Amino acid sequence: MLADDWPDGVWPLRRDVPYDLQPPPATGVRPPLNPAPEGATVLAMGPFFPVLEEPAYFRLFVEGETIVGCDYRGFYNHRGIEKLGDSTLTYNEVPYLAERICGICGFIHSTCYCQAVEKAIGVEAPRRARFIRTLMLELERVHSHLLWLGIAGHILGFDTVLMQTWRIREPVMWLAEEISGNRKTYGMNTVGGLRRDLKAALVPKILEVLAEVERESLAVRDAIVGDSTLHARTRGVGVLTREWARSICVVGPPARASGLAIDARVDHPYAAYDEVVPRIAVQGAGDTWARVLVRVEELLESIRLIREAARALPEGPILATLPERVPDGRVGISVVEAPRGEAVHYVMTGGDNRPYRWRVRAPTYPNLQAVPAMIVQQTIADVPIVLGSLDPCFSCTERMEAVDVRSGALRVYTPQELLALSRSARGGAPR
Amino acid sequence: VNGLDAGARVAQAMQEQLGAALHGVAREPADAVRLVIDRAAVRPATLALRDEFDARFLISVGSDRRELGGGFCVEHIFSLDHDHLYVVLDCAVAEDDARIDSISPLVPGASWAEREFRAG
C-alpha cells in the first residue's frame, strides 16, 4: 500500500528503484472512499481516535445509532521495511529491523524472519535455541494478552481490569529484561539460533514469577467471567461468523473464537512446538466475549508451555554453523503464532549477503479486513470494543491539531503541510 | 492417489486440472510445494486448492525478477493446515504485459495483498 501522495508510475519495490527515493508529492491520487448509502450519515472515526490510539480511519455509515456500512482507510505510516531488508541490510542485520515491526511482537518477527532464512538455506537452529525461542515467544504472548485484557477493560470503562492486569504484567517485562537485556526481548535472535543464552540461574526465577502471574491471572479471570456488565457489552456484540472468518482468512484468537481451530504452532510446528505441544483454545460464538475467553485460556496455556519448555530445556549450543556463503535463489516460508495471530515471513535469498525479496504479513493485516462485516447492525458505542477485540496493531503515527495558547486559535494541518513539516524537521533533504 | 503425501496429491491434482498450464513442480524446502503455472491458470488453480484441498490463503508476494533473467512474478501462498504444508502458486508475469487475473473473487481475503502488486 502506498502513501496518499505517492505518484502513479513509480514502483518502489522494483529492484531498480533506490530505497531512499523521495519523488515529489503528487496530488489527487488518493484512492477514493466509498460514498454513504442513501439515507445514511457519515460518522468519521479516526484517523486518530482516543480508544484506539493508533492511526486508522473508519468511515462509518449510520442510520441513527445503527451502523449500516463502513469503509476503511489505513496504511498511514509506510515504513519501507521490506525494501530496506532487501536493498541495504545484510542477513543478520534484518532481525534488528524485523523485531521493530511491532512494539509488542518483537521476538515473534525476528524468529519468523530467521526461520525463513534457515529454511531457505537448509540450516536448523540447535535444539536448545529452539526451546529458548519457544519460551520467549510464550512470554511475549503472556504479556501481550495481559496488556490486551487491560485495554479491553479500559475501552469498556472497567479501568480496574486495566490497572490490575498491567500490574500483573510488569514482572513479566522485568523478566524479559533480565533474559534479553531489554524489556522488549530485542537483540536475541540471529540466523541459525540465538546471540544470547538463557542463564541457568534464571530458570527458577522464571518459574517463580510465572507462579505468581498465574495465581493473579486466575483471580482476574474469576472476577470477570461472571461480570454482568462485561457480558452485556460483549455477548452477541461484533459477531464474526465462522464462514466469513474463513473467507476473509482471519487468523489468531479472532479466528479461534469463531470456531476455526487454526494455530501456526500446531499447523506448521516450529521452534520446540513439536515437543512442547499447545492445546488450541476454541470458542464457537464468534462474538467479543468469545474472543475474551480465548485469550484468557491462551494466557494460562502459555504459562503451562513456558513451564514445560523451562523444565525440558536441553543443554548444548545455541547457534548452528552457517555456510560460508548463502546460496542465492532459495525460498523459505515461515509462520509464527503471534498473540494477534499468525505472522508470515517469506524470504528469497540473494547473492549479495542479503535477501533478494523479503515479504512480511502481520496478523492484523487479514484481521482488519473482517471489521466492516463485524460492525454492521451494531451501535456506534460498540465499535471501539469490537475493533479492540481484534487486538489490532497498527504501525504508530499520529495526526495533530495546533492550538495557539495565547489566542486559543485552532489550526488543523493538511496532509501536505504535515509532510512538508516532517521533511523540514529532519533537515529538508531526502535521506 | 492413496499413499501419496499431500504435496504429491496437490501436484497430481493440478496436473489433471491444468494440464500444460502447469509448467513445473518443486518440493524444496520440504514443507512446501511450488507449482509453476501459467498466469492464465491462476483462477482454476486457486479454485482447486480452495475447494478440493481446503487450502487457506496466507499472503501474496510480488517480485521483480528481471535481474534473474525473468520478468515479474506473482506468488500466492496457501497453507494446507492439516498436512503442515505450504503451497505456492508461482506465476510469471511479463514486463511488457504486467497483468494477471485477480483471485479475490474466489478468496476475498486476498484483496489487500493483490492491491499491493501495484507497488511491486
Image: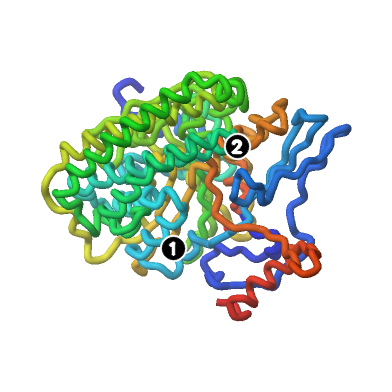
Give the percent coordinates (x, y) of residue A74: 64, 49
- Whether callout 2 and callout 1 share a subunit is answered yes
Badge 2 is on which residue? A387
Q: Specify the farthest residue to the left.
A: A315
Name the residue: 63% across, 60% down: B96
Q: Identify the image quadrant of residue A342.
A: top left
Distance from the alpha carbon under mark 2 to that under mark 1: 31 Å
Give the percent coordinates (x, y) of residue A428: 63, 80
- The front one of A145 and A321 is A145
Label 2 crowding class (10 Å Cα cut-off): few <14, some 14-19, many 20+? Answer: many
In this view, the mark in front (2 or 1): 2
Residue B61 in view, yes or no? yes
- The front one of A385 and B28 is A385
Secondary structure beneath label 1: helix
* Discs 2, 1 touching: Cβ within 8 Å: no
Name the residue: 23% across, 46% down: A132
Horizontal arrangement in the rendering, residue A288 relative to residue A198 (left or right): right
Q: Which quarter of the rendered picture does the C terminus of chain A lie within?
A: bottom right
Q: Specify the farthest residue to the right.
A: A39
Colour treatment of the image: rainbow
Name the residue: 69% across, 67% down: A418
Q: Which quarter of the rendered picture does the N terminus of chain A lie within?
A: bottom right
Give the percent coordinates (x, y) of residue A25: 71, 69
The amino acid pointed to by label 1 is: Gly
Name the residue: 81% across, 65% down: A409
- The front one of A25 and A283 is A283
The amino acid pointed to by label 2 is: Leu
Badge 1 is on which residue? A85
Horizontal arrangement in the rendering, residue A274 relative to residue A79 (left or right): left
